Image: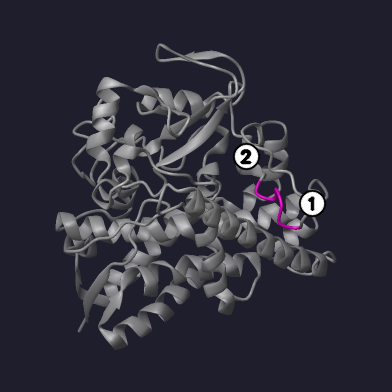
């Protein structure tokens, strides 16, 4: 789960990354930009692009100079249940940030999640039962999508049988136009607004029903949080559902994609390659969130470039995580890499709230998957990128059960 404003309002990619090939493999462009234009203004997209690790980290940590509050970029106000609700912990600065995040932080600590591990294993095994029967499956559609959606739905306390609807809403909120035309942009924005309004009404009803506090789910926790107003409670629920499933889906997909590409799937299964370290390296090597935005609050300087108050700044996490000034041999996948100070989950006050849950889900999912099958073959011959975050549309696999 990535707690960043990158999970909403995604626009057109840079011209250099508009082909499917470049979206799958943007890393050569990152290297060129780190070397030649580490802080670069894109006139077409009207944003400063930032590529080096130290610069990205500085912006993420300096919330006084670079705010997460996207309302400074555009007026997000609305009177509807769905309007403006995504202005939550991901798009706020202190002191509001601490208030919007603090009431739930304890629930996402590793110790609190430890008791949930048996249930995660059970949910994973249920999906694998169906896969074992078929033998051939789409890893994305049949495993990487339903598992995180089901997990976050259970934690929120909402019916998991509606997970197709939840996925549809999530996809609409992170979609970006497939064509850079006014009609395509308007269509995506309209669908995004519709999804946000529908989610807003859905969660507003659930929150009203749980104000008596009779429950241990996250919706009940939000419903009884005196420090949040009505819109903030709705926004919290939307954010958790969205961020709690879509980036974890891509982490799982990118892990199997990378393990198969590198030829280490069997080594991860046997323990010759440490599974936890390998997942950490996937987060660096193929970060599910490649970029996020901040807004300059004042005139400032960044790596020799003058940035004006109100300017949008796009931080390329995927580039920072391959910066040779920080990572030795950064273009190589090295699961034994230590230390591994990647910033796939961000850093500073906006460090991903759900990072422990995402790591736990990935660890359990991959462990159960590889222990259930003594052979897993993924078809990497025709990979298609997502049109939103960094991942794959599908990943056909064939498995053989362990005898």
Tell me if 48 is positioned left or right of 374 in this view.
right
Q: How would you classify the magenta stretch by its main secondary structure?
A: loop
Q: Is residue 83 magenta?
A: yes
Q: CA distance from mark 1 to mark 2?
A: 19 Å
Residue 398 appears in the figure? yes
- Of residues 251 and 280, the one nearer the viewer is 251
Q: Is residue 322 magenta?
A: no
Is label 1 or label 2 in front? 1
- Of residues 255 and 246, the one nearer the viewer is 246
User: Residue 314 location, x and y as percent?
Assistant: 46, 32
State the residue position of label 2: 91
Tell me if 291 is positioned left or right of 74 in this view.
left
User: What residue range appears in magenta?
Assistant: 81-86
- Quarter of the figure with residue 330: top left
State the residue position of label 1: 79
Screen quadrant of the C terminus: bottom left
Q: Secondary structure at mark 1?
A: loop
Instruction: Please determine whether, in this image, residue 354 is positioned above or below residue 38.
Output: below
- Quarter of the figure with residue 220: bottom right
Tell me if 165 is positioned left or right of 387 in this view.
right
Q: Residue at x 78, y 59 (%)?
A: 223
């Amino acid at each position: 789960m990535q707690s960043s404003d990158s999970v909403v309002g995604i626009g057109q990619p840079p011209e250099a990354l508009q082909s499917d090939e470049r979206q799958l493999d943007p890393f050569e462009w990152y290297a060129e930009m780190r070397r030649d234009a580490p802080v670069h203004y894109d006139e077409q997209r009207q944003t400063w692009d930032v590529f080096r690790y130290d610069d990205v980290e500085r912006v993420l940590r300096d919330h006084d100079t670079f705010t997460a509050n996207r309302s400074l970029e555009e007026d997000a106000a609305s009177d509807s249940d769905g309007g403006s609700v995504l202005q939550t912990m991901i798009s706020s600065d202190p002191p509001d940030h601490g208030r919007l995040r603090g009431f739930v932080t304890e629930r996402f600590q590793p110790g609190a999640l430890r008791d949930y591990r048996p249930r995660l294993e059970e949910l994973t095994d249920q999906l694998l039962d169906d896969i074992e029967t078929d033998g051939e499956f789409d890893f994305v559609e049949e495993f990487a999508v339903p598992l995180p959606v089901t997990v976050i739905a259970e934690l929120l306390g909402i019916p998991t049988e509606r997970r197709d609807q939840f996925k549809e809403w999530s996809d609409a909120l992170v979609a970006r136009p497939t064509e850079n035309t006014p009609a395509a942009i308007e269509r995506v924005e309209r669908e995004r607004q519709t999804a946000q309004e529908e989610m807003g009404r859905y969660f507003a009803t659930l929150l009203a029903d749980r104000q008596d506090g009779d429950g241990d789910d996250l919706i009940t926790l939000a419903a009884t949080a005196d420090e949040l107003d009505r819109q903030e409670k709705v926004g919290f629920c939307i954010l958790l559902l969205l961020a709690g499933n879509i980036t974890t889906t891509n982490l799982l997909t990118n892990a199997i994609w990378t393990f198969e590409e590198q030829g280490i799937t069997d080594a991860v299964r046997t323990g010759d390659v440490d599974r936890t370290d390998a997942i950490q390296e996937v987060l660096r090597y193929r970060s599910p969130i490649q970029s996020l935005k901040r807004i300059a609050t004042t005139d400032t300087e960044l790596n020799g470039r003058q940035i004006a108050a109100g300017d949008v700044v796009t931080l390329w996490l995927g580039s920072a995580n391959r910066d040779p000034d920080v990572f030795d041999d950064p273009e190589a996948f090295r699961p034994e890499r230590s230390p591994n100070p990647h910033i796939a989950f961000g850093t500073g006050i906006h460090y991903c709230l759900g990072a422990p849950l995402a790591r736990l889900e990935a660890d359990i999912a991959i462990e159960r998957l590889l222990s259930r099958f003594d052979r897993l073959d993924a078809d990497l011959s025709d990979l298609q990128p997502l049109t939103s975050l960094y991942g794959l549309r599908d990943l056909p696999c064939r498995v053989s059960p362990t005898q």
